[in-house]
Image: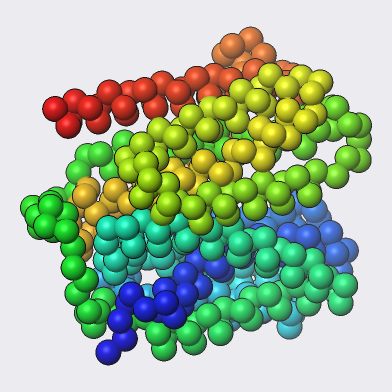
Amino acid sequence: MVKQDSLLTKIAFLGISFVLTSAYAINGALPQMTEALHISSTEAQVLATTPSITVTVFVLLSSFIAAKLGDKNTIILGVTLVGLAGIVPMFTDSYVIILASRTILGAGLGIFNSLAVSMIAVMYNGKTRAAMLGYRAAAEQVGQAVLTLLAGLLMAFGWRATFLVYLIAFPILFLFIKRVPDTSEMTPLQSSKSEKTTVEKITRISPLVLVFTLFAAFLVIDYMAIQLSFPFMATELKGEGYNTSPILSAMLIAATVGGVTYGWFVATFGRFTLQIGLVLMAVSNFLVAFSHGNFIMLIAGVLLIGFPLQLISPFIFNQLPKLGPVARQSLITSIILIGFNVGVFVEPMFVATFASLIGHGGGSAAASAYATIPYLGLVLLIIAIVTVITSRKQEK
């Protein structure tokens, strides 16, 4: 019987997170596809955004699919769909067929998105669970960086070649099938007595799940406000044509470091990991917001933002076993993931609306961000203070 705490099993399981952000890996080929397929730029952009829509839908459906097929079989189905649908554009010039394949690709990603998180709660506990959640977050960041870079290199052979990146799903799938046990076959791991007692008492989903969902949405709004506004801010300082891609790639690397070190932070600072992450995100906001004319200060704020986000998001997922029974972990995780996805979707509208409310509407994207970001940082500090006070009251 395969033990879930073996190193190869952990690598096999983390492999599925490596492809979770692969939907956007081929975005660099969109201009070539526009010309080759004789479509408009809007139609090309639809090919890029369509997977995100079906991801959101199937994140909600995944818990029901898993109830029928089992966790492992559901992940196998999702990764298989990613591999097969991902390479379809290599063999056709039909926009409709390519759009359909991108839709199915998103469905595949959505099917196992929540299970990539919730199965960690089932398979591991304590420090191991915390470390695995951090590594999983890092695997997503590394996957996005590696697959985007690989797709860019393949573009030298034409836009079709970029879709070869999705073939990586098959070796990952093979390793997953061979090394990751089904939840019904797993070797029970020893939990601490207090954790075991707490988990056994949980019989229903806590209302705190909604609080965490709103919190997740806010975190992503803040993160995306800085990420999406940075190119406009940099252009204002450095002029048109300034290439921000290397800095944004470095931001991704910083986020990866956050995920990798999450287990150490939890082991060292415990529950204060959340407050450390919130304070660091607030510092990032203030560096960006008050960087007018200071490019070094702006870059420092941009590079910092991803690191604390990858401390906080695994922290959220690490709390989920305490917020509902084991059988409902997939559903709870799906709800939290919806919060993250909704945050991405509403960020442009949120920033524009808030900027208008404080008298900075109608300006440039950079001006709106400069006006909004310090207030978001202030909210992060307030949340940090409130959570410290709440934690102390619970201890007493």
Quadrant assignment for the N terminus: bottom left
Q: Residue at x 57, y 27 (%)?
A: 283
Left or right: 136 as drawn, with respect to 122: right
Which residue is at the front of the view, 182 or 38? 182
- Evaluate whether residue 309 shows in this view: yes
Residue 99 place in picture, x, y as percent: 65, 67
Quadrant assignment for the C terminus: top left
Residue 148 place in picture, x, y as percent: 71, 63
Whether 24 is drawn above or below 314: the answer is: below
Q: Residue at x 39, y 26 (%)?
A: 383
Residue 322 place in picture, x, y as percent: 21, 50
Left or right: 91 as drawn, with respect to 373: right
Q: Residue furthest top?
A: 359
Q: Residue furthest front?
A: 268
Whether 153 is drawn above or below 304: the answer is: below
Residue 38 place in picture, x, y as percent: 85, 64
Which residue is at the front of the view, 266 or 91? 266
- Evaluate whether residue 202 shows in this view: no
Quadrant in which residue 149 is drawn: bottom right
Rendering colour mode: rainbow
Left or right: 21 as drawn, with respect to 96: left
Q: Residue at x 67, y 60 (%)?
A: 145
Quadrant in which residue 189 is drawn: bottom left
Left or right: 270 as drawn, with respect to 374: left
